[in-house]
């Protein structure tokens, strides 16, 4: 007997507009259970209906305020309470941010993402970040910031500064969240995403895979993202980068094909979103990255550093793109 669900029982939603899709955890878990070749084929079909399959978007990250964070996210090098190698740094001056943004543009990035290790920004910090957004936007780059939870009115201030995207990850399934983070709640993340949407800013939200969660947790995270109305325009899928000194330092790495399945599930359930192959790429072979692109990933972080950890050098990514015939957007 074959307990594997037939792809045809799951295709109904692919042709509907993204906003109408309502996925259940059982449906997404059934996607995970498909034979890998069938799953990737479906993901490619959805991908090709919505995107040029040979194009990849590139975003460059800069940590504008590093370390010393009050929160207890079990994976994070920047939480003040864990003894990690990350050194605390104050908010960067505008000229340094602008120089990094110009360098990212010169290397071919289309979006510049500025990250701060805050639970949420204070109003005086937000004013400084708004200046950074205005200046980076002035270079002709798309802008993204990730600053933690927002209070009333802060999203509109960012919108006025010209912000294109706000990154705020759901990170993991609501039912697993408390095992990784206790200083804020999954519901707080959803609340901030609502404020971002309300202000007319595009949403970038995804999660981390490989934190000891179950497959059902992974499917539930994908459902929680896909059922946002509308789904996030950009969906970063991070593979946990284990950080010595954090509670998740020694979690067993996830099987690569389970990671690829997660990318495919994100692609199928969020057909019009950019799915970003995010943290963890430095530890991946070129072949595994190619499999992730085949499964529907069409965006990467580009440049040799993420926030505090390494990422493949831009020249290596260029060479990989050349070999695969991928074109930057
Ligand atoms: N403090 C803000 C927040 O938590 O939203 C913004 C910065 S925080 C570092 C941004 C995201 O980075 C987290 O939501 C998480 O998804 C990702 N991240 C942090 N550490 C990571 C790690 N070790 N491996 C993979 N992703 C990580
Ligand atoms: C996201 O989803 N991943 C990025 C970005 N959004 C801010 C951050 C990854 C951080 C990886 C660990 C580090 O460099 O500290
Ligand atoms: Fe790290 Fe952000 Fe959590 Fe702070 S809120 S510990 S920066 S992931």
Image (cartoon, rainbow, N blue to C red):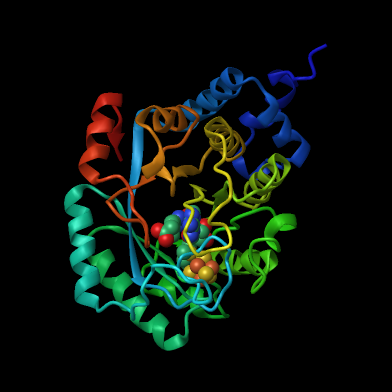
**215 horizontally vs 89: left or right:** right
Residue reaching furthest to the bottom: 124
Residue 203 visible in image = no
Residue 35 position (above or below residue 250)? above
Residue nearest the observer in this picture, 107 or 282 = 282
Residue 153, x across and y down, in percent? 53, 80
Q: For residue 184, which quarter of the picture?
A: bottom right
Please tell me which residue is depicted at 60% across the width and 51% down the height of the picture.
211
Give the residue at x 30% y 30%.
326
175 with respect to 294 (left or right): right
Q: Which quadrant: the C terminus? A: top left
Residue 103, horizontal then vertical, whole percent = 18, 58
| Residue at the top extreme of this rendering | 1
State the count of labels: 0
**Residue plotted at (64% across, 52% down):** 229
Please provide percent x and percent y for residue 124: 41, 88
Residue 126 drawn above or below residue 250:
below
Which residue is nearer to you in this view: 124 or 184? 184
Q: Residue at x 46, y 71 (%)?
A: 147
Q: Is residue 134 visible?
A: yes
């Amino acid at each position: 007997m074959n307990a594997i669900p037939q792809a045809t029982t799951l295709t109904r939603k692919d042709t509907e507009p993204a906003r109408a899709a309502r996925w259940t955890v059982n449906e997404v878990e059934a996607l995970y259970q498909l034979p890998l070749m069938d799953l990737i084929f479906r993901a490619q079909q959805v991908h090709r209906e919505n995107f040029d399959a040979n194009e990849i978007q590139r975003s460059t990250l800069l940590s504008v305020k590093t370390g010393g964070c009050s929160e207890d996210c079990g994976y994070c090098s920047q939480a003040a309470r864990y003894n990690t190698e990350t050194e605390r740094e104050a908010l960067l001056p505008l000229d340094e941010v602008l120089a990094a943004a110009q360098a990212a543009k010169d290397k071919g990035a289309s979006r510049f993402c500025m990250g701060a290790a805050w639970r949420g920004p204070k109003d005086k910090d937000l004013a400084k970040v708004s200046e950074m957004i205005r200046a980076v936007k002035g270079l002709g780059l798309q802008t993204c910031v990730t600053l933690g939870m927002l209070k009333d009115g802060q999203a509109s201030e960012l919108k006025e500064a010209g912000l294109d995207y706000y990154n705020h990850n759901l990170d993991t399934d609501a039912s697993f969240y408390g095992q990784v983070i206790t200083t804020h709640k999954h519901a707080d993340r959803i609340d901030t995403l609502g404020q971002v949407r309300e202000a007319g800013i595009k949403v970038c939200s995804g999660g981390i895979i490989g934190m000891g969660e179950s497959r059902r947790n992974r499917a539930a995270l994908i459902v929680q993202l896909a059922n946002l109305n509308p789904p996030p325009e950009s969906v970063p899928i991070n593979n946990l980068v284990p950080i010595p000194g954090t509670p998740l330092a020694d979690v067993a790495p996830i099987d690569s094909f389970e990671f690829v399945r997660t990318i495919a599930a994100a692609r199928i359930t969020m057909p019009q979103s950019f799915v970003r192959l995010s943290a963890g790429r430095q530890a991946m072979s070129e072949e595994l990255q190619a499999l992730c692109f085949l499964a529907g990933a069409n965006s990467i972080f580009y440049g040799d550093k993420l926030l505090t950890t390494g990422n493949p050098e831009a020249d290596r990514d260029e060479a990989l793109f050349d070999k695969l015939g991928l074109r930057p957007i």
